[in-house]
Amino acid sequence: MHAFSDPTSPIYARVTGMFYLGIAIAGGFAIAYVPSQIVVPDDPAQTIANILNRSTLYQSGIAADVVVMIFEIMALTMLYFMFKPVSSTLSLAAGMARLSMVSVMSAMLFFHAGATLLATSPDLMPSFNASQRADLAGLFLEMHRAGVWIWQVFFTVHLVLLGALIVASNKAPRLIGIGLMLGASGYLLDSVYAFAFPDAALLGALRVALLVIVTLSELSFALWLVIKGQSTATPAQRMAFSH
């Protein structure tokens, strides 16, 4: 429990960084890899077949989603206390934005559950034929995918605030904070692009460029925490935290 007792210590920062890296690894598996192997665009019947034939991979993706949410709760809590001496208001707002993101993520699992039931329980909704059941399961998976575009809005807010807190502190290089604030809008533009302007080529290219910046900044921040920890707090910072 010592690692969680002092938010100003290097070990506390390293544990926070490990949670952050865990989110990146599990999230990449659940959000990018598994759907690419299971979901076949415009072919819900084949998607259902993949869920059945590759059930271990599909269920592993759901398990990875759960791991992400658990790690998110730990990371956002630790980040809140780490940056509370810098600005208690902004640190709380950043934590609330990230918690809102996790809430959307948890709701998205209901759509996974619906698709799973339709794929594995043929006695469910017997009035529907196989094609209709596949179409409905495909709709659930599309709604799950749309959930990503929703939580990205909250994540944008979180990253802008986190970047500002990093710039105002000595927890990590200012360049990382600037990268987070600049690149965060990539998540927002990705949602806008998907929902409203899927044919806007320039917007699509811009959001990719910004997503590259924010991804590199996030990974740099996580690695900095794991490798460097954080600087020892000054007496003034310790006093601010104690209040």
Image: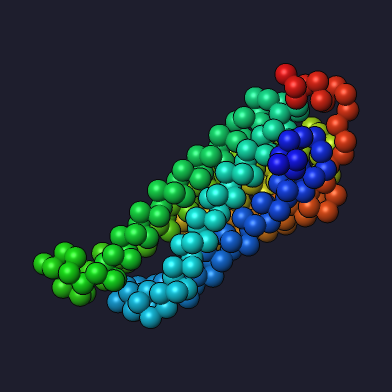
Res 32 → quadrant: bottom right
Determine if residue 221 is in view: no
Colouring: rainbow
Q: Could you tell whether 224 is left or right of 204 in the image?
A: right
Res 155 → quadrant: top right
The residue positioned 68% from the left and 56% from the top of the image is 21
Q: Could you tell whether 204 is left or right of 85 in the image?
A: left
Q: Could you tell whether 110 is left or right of 227 in the image?
A: left
The N terminus lies in which quarter of the figure?
Answer: top right
Where residue 87 sits in the image (x, y, percent)? 71, 26
The residue positioned 44% from the left and 68% from the top of the image is 59
The residue positioned 56% from the left and 66% from the top of the image is 29
Please determine whether, in this image, residue 159 is positioned above or below residue 46. Answer: above
Q: Looking at the image, which is closer to me, 44 or 242?
A: 242
Where residue 25 sits in the image (x, y, percent)? 63, 62
Please determine whether, in this image, residue 1 is positioned above or below residue 45. Answer: above
Where residue 209 sits in the image (x, y, percent)? 66, 58
The C terminus lies in which quarter of the figure?
Answer: top right
Where residue 79 sits in the image (x, y, percent)? 68, 39
